Image (spheres, rainbow, N blue to C red):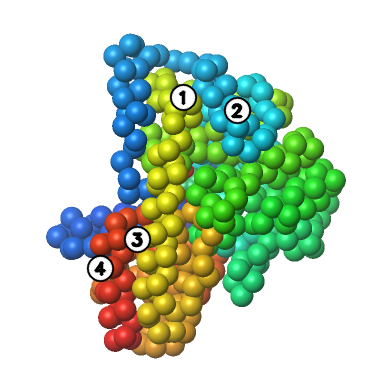
Amino acid sequence: MATLPALKQFTDRVNRIEISATMAVVAEASKLKAGGADLVEFGAGEPHFPTPQHIKDAAIAAIQQNFTRYTAVAGMAELRSAIVQRHATDFGSDYKPDEAIASTGGKLALFNAVQVLVDHGDEVILPVPYWVSFKDIIEYGGGKCVYVETDENEGFRLTADMIERSVTPRTRAIIINSPNNPSGAVINPQDFTAILRMAHKRGIYVIADECYVYLNYTGSTFSAGSVRDVKEHLVIAGSLSKTYAMTGWRLGYALAPAPIISAMTKLQSQSTSSSAQMIQKAAVAALTGSQQCVADMKAEYIQLRDLTLDLLGKIPGISCVKPQGAFYVYPNVSAYFGRTGVESGADVAKRLLHEAHVVTVPGEAFGTRDHIRLSYATSAQEIKRGLERMKEWFAKL
Ligand SMILES: Cc1ncc(COP(=O)(O)O)c(C=O)c1O
């Protein structure tokens, strides 16, 4: 096949990034499915539950009542109030509505936060394993990722000391995601507080991705927002996607000091503007209504996690740190490397997809090559079917 001439077709900033690896896996799996393959899907990171009825009803009512217009860029006043009140009630944080912005998904809130804080050549500390998009969001903004490795033998623990060793005069921000995608690790409140205080003292921003903050199975929940004295250097990115099974609705938010929120609003005013008005109304219903649905989903995720771990434990050679939150397991499959051409998590994920019809995501997408990620946000039946296929596949390797 003829190769394309090396013309500079696109901008440097877009050439610096790659398509999201999880989206790429979903695309490859879709092709196989379109060809009739019966896949077991552990790939995409989204709840298998439908959005709770009262949230759907609120959206339908909003459309009927003609909430179908532009709103203020940062979101309607009632939504910004609902966001800060929910957070204050659940975590004891102290934000005012002008310290909140609603965005079209938590990913956009994170993207905007990085674009307003990180300049060319700035360093951003990123603990490994990291969620796929952080690296590209930082690099798109011209920032440099400084990776801090965590050790799975320590449960992927992250401490202030580990981070402080990587701080330089160019360090601008640290991105923390707890509960973590992909490992499910939860930073304990003491370690998290020490990280926040260390960063605050040095004038470094912590961007805390709280996408899974309600899916914490340790028995106590924790938000960086509870540490009120570091607020000046803290940006919290939140999302309704996983908490309320609302991935497709695209509603996330950020909490931060008002000047940061103003800068993010300015940026958002030149791209997506506000999120859709009827979705904002549904988000108000989600945040102000009964939170029983959140507790119910969480209880089921814990059962699904335990089932997945139990079945993974029956595959010889595979080890897996017990996740304390989110809905992923991150097994180490390196015991199989060196067998019939399998050398990395990427090889395992690819062959599992094509030979066992099980969809997983390679660890390389999250900065490690010894692992694959499985999302257990699916039915117990699918988990059993998929893990049985995996067991057979590994046995034949
Ligand atoms: C760690 C993490 N942060 C942020 C997001 C963004 O979620 P959304 O844009 O759907 O709010 C995701 C989604 O998978 C995630 O896993």
Q: Specify whether 365 is left or right of 296.
A: right
Mark sitting earlier along the chain (4/2) = 2
Q: Do the residues labelled 1 and 3 touch (CB within 8 Å)?
A: no
Question: Which quadrant of the view contains residue 35?
Answer: bottom left
Residue 207 vertical placement versus 368 (above, below)? above
Q: Tell me the CA gap for discs 2 and 3.
A: 33 Å
* SS for callout 3: loop
Give the mark, 1 or 3, whose residue is nearer the N terminus: 3
The circle on residue 84 is 2
Which residue shows up at 48% across the image and 77% down it?
319
Give the spatial CA distance, label 1 vs label 3. Answer: 31 Å
Q: Residue at x 80, y 47 (%)?
A: 197
How far apart are labels 1 and 2 at the CA level? 11 Å
Amino acid of disc 3: Phe
| Count of numbered marks | 4
Q: Is residue 347 visible?
A: no
The mark lying in front, picked from 3 and 4, is: 4
Please state which amino acid type lies under the numbered disc 4: Arg
Circle 4 sits on which residue?
385
Residue at which label 1 appears: 284
